[in-house]
Image (tube, helix red, strand yellow):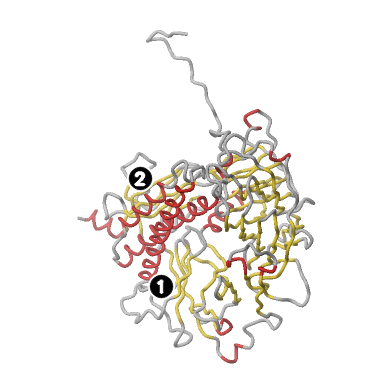
Amino acid sequence: MSHSPHSPLPPLPIWKDELYLEFHRGCYTTRADQKRQNRRCEELLYQAELLSSISTICTGAVYPKSELETAWKQVLFNQFHDILPGSAIAQVYVDANLAFAEADRTCREIMAKSLEAIAAQISLPSPPQPDAQPILIFNPLNWLRSEVVAVPIPDSAAETWQIYDCSGQRLATQISRVDRPEPQFTLLFLVNNLPAVGYRVFWLCRAEAETLENSLPPTQKLLQIDLAQVTNNLTPKLAVCQETHFETERKVLENEFIRATVDCETGNLSSIWDKVNHREVLNTFGGDRLQAFSDSGQYWDAWNIDPNYQKHQLPSPLLKDISWVEQGEVRQSLRVTRQIGKSMFCQDYIVDIGSPLLKIKTVVDWQETHVLIKTAFGLNQSANFATCEIPCGTIDRPTQPQTAAEKAKWEVPILRWVDISNDGFGVSLLNDCKYGCDFQPNQLRLTLLRGSTWPDELADIGIHEFTYAVYPHSGNWQNAGTVRRGYELNLPSLVQVFPQLGENCHKTLPTVGKFLDLSADNLVLMAFKQSEDDANFWIVRCYESEGKQAVLELDGDLGLAIVRPVDLLEKSANSPQKSDDGRSLKISPWKIVSLAVNRYCTIQQTVKS
């Protein structure tokens, strides 16, 4: 049908939904090592920019602009199709792994130097002992948090070390040991109220003679368990593990928030009791059921999942061992080892003091081809939709699809979490590097691994490490702060032990510091970096994460104020007006905001001149 130049064009059709690609469902999972390295490098780049910016502002250190740019380009290049989707030939990943490793190394070096420079400016109180070593615990996220951290211990005499806060109070600690292959000891303790983009200082001390006898519970004995007796196909990382032995066999992990029960016949979770809301989280199906399916890959092996895979479920995993790893005041950890085909799954169920999460830390020696693995959680509730995290937002997807387009979404992408909530209660399933997911009204499943053989016949063969976590909560995902819990799983606090840092003269930072707080529960900091065009300015980038208006108010020891809103290219942008003092700004739901900022005193001096 033709139209005259002056006649109105017919309205364009509207597609009000995500752009879902039906023939690349396997790309969420294939080459799991690339997904993990990409997630890690993105997190490291954020932290490297953040710490180097703080270090430059507080100490005058040179901002590593060229090093960061190189690392960013290495990571961004690896996000090209077919690298990150996992559908490239084997040689591509030789080069990609080198680039990821170099970016990782660059970021860690920048972070270490920046933390050292920041620590050197902290004015320390008198140590509880002359040889005490200061520990800096840094929170890279823009909200107050509390979590268990692990401090590396200098030698194998683990029981001789203790933690003190800066007021001189000794904290509850727990020894944790890993053999990979040499023994490595850490000291676990709970850090409460760690400030937003901030830090706290503690002391690492040797135990005094009179307290040494009480440093370990009398029932604890350190043993080494040789998992090679279970399987001959595990690498040294899995071959030896550390276990704490108890006279009475138990299968329950518990803290003040949850009580998790493990079925000793299958290794599955038979119960998660929410002690806060007084209700059972799982239905009779249970949780963390590892399900294996035959997966031919449909037309293109690496790209696709067989649409009929659920009709070809493989036998249930074979339970090889259940053994306690840790059961102390700070952490409880139960190790479950299961076998699927030729592959070993070694999973630690972990409950930490002060945390409502049940973490499942997993190491897999994957030796399968044309097999798909999912973990399934049957929930003691039902909902019509599941909420999935997507970049800088969320999407609600139906759990009972009706239309052809909805039914095609039997495998969907997520970022850090997926949540089912209804009737004042919900469950979030968090992850640290997995992207494929599916769900029913009362079930969540996370896709863990695939076994494609083309175009790379050994694509996922080898060792994989990942962690996912169950988070039961009241209310919906917004009320529960699921966005924050997802970030916390992916970005644990940084721990750095320093030698004595010298005299306190000319040191300006306190023992507890908050560098940058956005002052709104629904704002997430995405970047704090030096401006690309003017080294006198800094860029704060954040997004609204819960679909409601927010008021950003800059707070913190850096004393920052807004100069002007900018776009992603850091050019001046039209945006809601900032307050007269430059400290606050209204932000619309789901909006990504970039701001050029500077220290308030610098802005005032510029205005006066």
Res 18 → quadrant: top right
Q: Is residue 264 left or right of residue 179?
A: right
Residue labelled with disc 1: 510
Q: Quadrant of residue 130?
A: bottom left
Circle 1: residue type: Pro
Say if residue 126 shows up in the picture. Answer: yes
- Furthest-bottom residue in view? 209
> As displayed, is residue 329 above or below residue 522?
below
> Which comes before the other along the chain, label 1 or label 2?
1
In the displayed structure image, the side of residue 375 where residue 547 appears, left or right = left
Q: Is residue 278 visible?
A: no
Q: Residue at x 41, y 47 (%)?
A: 76
Residue 166 locus on image (x, y percent): 48, 78
On screen, residue 64 versus residue 513, left or right, reads left
Indicate the position of residue 374 as horizontal and vertical percent values. 66, 49
| Residue pictured at 57% horizontal, 78% vertical | 171
Q: Residue at x 41, y 45 (%)?
A: 593
Secondary-structure class at tag 1: loop
* Pointer 2 local density, CA inside 10 Å: few below 14, some 14–19, many at least 20: many
Marking on residue 565 = 2
What residue type is disc 2 on? Pro
User: Mark 1 to mark 2: distance in Å?
Assistant: 31 Å
Of residues 295 and 599, which is closer to you in this image?
Answer: 295
Q: Residue 432 placed where, x, y %? A: 56, 55
User: CB atoms at circles 1 and 2 under 8 Å apart?
Assistant: no
Q: Nearer the viewer, residue 293 or 327?
A: 293
Query: On screen, 256 above or below 467?
Result: below
